[in-house]
Amino acid sequence: MTIIERIKGLILNRELVSYVVVGVLTTLVNFVFFTWVNEYVKGLGFGVSFASKAAYVTAFVAAVIFAYWANKLVVFKNFKMSPGYLLKEFAGFMSARIISGVITFILMAVCVDIIKMNEYLAWLLTSAFNLIFNYVASKFYIFKKS
């Protein structure tokens, strides 16, 4: 197999393409919740620093719930639904997301509070990091083929 064929196979890989699509949809869920909560909390009179953190946590939870089911069913086609299996799998998924969430939360705080970056640009950069980190964790640890 030539290098061109390998690259083509990677780019046209159903799993990778569906992960990117689900990632974009998850990012959209995240962005909608982030925007709504950020603007709402700022409207209550809180500053950008507090509002962006509250918005980030809320958006993170909504996006993780959506991402778990979309990745499980659409990307990795894992239809095992026994309660014990789901609990173990979801715990692994949540653990990886909490790790990436803490890292991106810290990055978000650094970008907004220290670097004084616009909160939406900071969100975009931290979301890109999150997407890559979570694909690796999902593919090789959470939804790996037995």
Image (cartoon, rainbow, N blue to C red):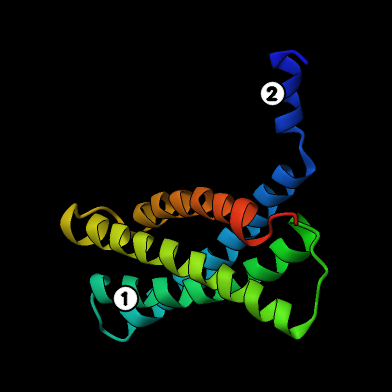
Q: Earlier in the sequence, mark 1 or mark 2?
A: 2
* Residue at x-position 68% and y-position 51%: 19
Q: Residue at x 32, y 73 (%)?
A: 53
Comparing 85 with 98, the one in front is 85
- Name the foreground residue: 134 vs 20: 134
User: On the image, numbered disc 2 is attached to which residue?
Assistant: 7
Query: Eyeballing the image, is 17 above or below 142?
Result: above
* Residue placed under numbered mark 1 in the picture: 51
What is the x, y in percent for residue 1? 78, 16
Q: Mark yes or no: residue 130 visible.
A: yes
139 is higher (above) or lower (below) than 65:
above
Residue reaching furthest left?
A: 114
Seen from the viewer's position, the closer of residues 91 and 29 is 91
Q: Amino acid at mark 2?
A: Ile
Question: Residue at left 64%, top 76%?
Answer: 88
Q: Nearer the viewer, residue 93 or 118?
A: 93
Marks counted in the figure total: 2
Mark nearest the camera among 1 and 2 is: 2
The amino acid beneath tag 1 is: Ala
> Label 1: few (<14), some or many (≥20) within 10 Å?
many
Give the distance between the C-alpha atoms of the residues marked 1 and 2, in whole angstroms: 42 Å
Q: Secondary structure at mark 2?
A: helix
Left or right: residue 28 compared with residue 18: left
| Residue found at x 41% / y 75% | 57
* Residue 94 against residue 16 in the figure, above or below: below
Q: Residue furthest top?
A: 2
Quadrant in the rendering for residue 50: bottom left
Q: Position of residue 86 (x, y in %)?
A: 71, 78
Which quarter of the picture shows residue 81?
bottom right
Question: Which class describes the residues within 10 Å of circle 2: few (<14), some (14-19), or many (20+)?
Answer: few
Measured as percent of width and height from the top left, residue 46 is found at: 25, 81
Q: Does dot 1 land on a helix, a strand or a loop?
A: helix
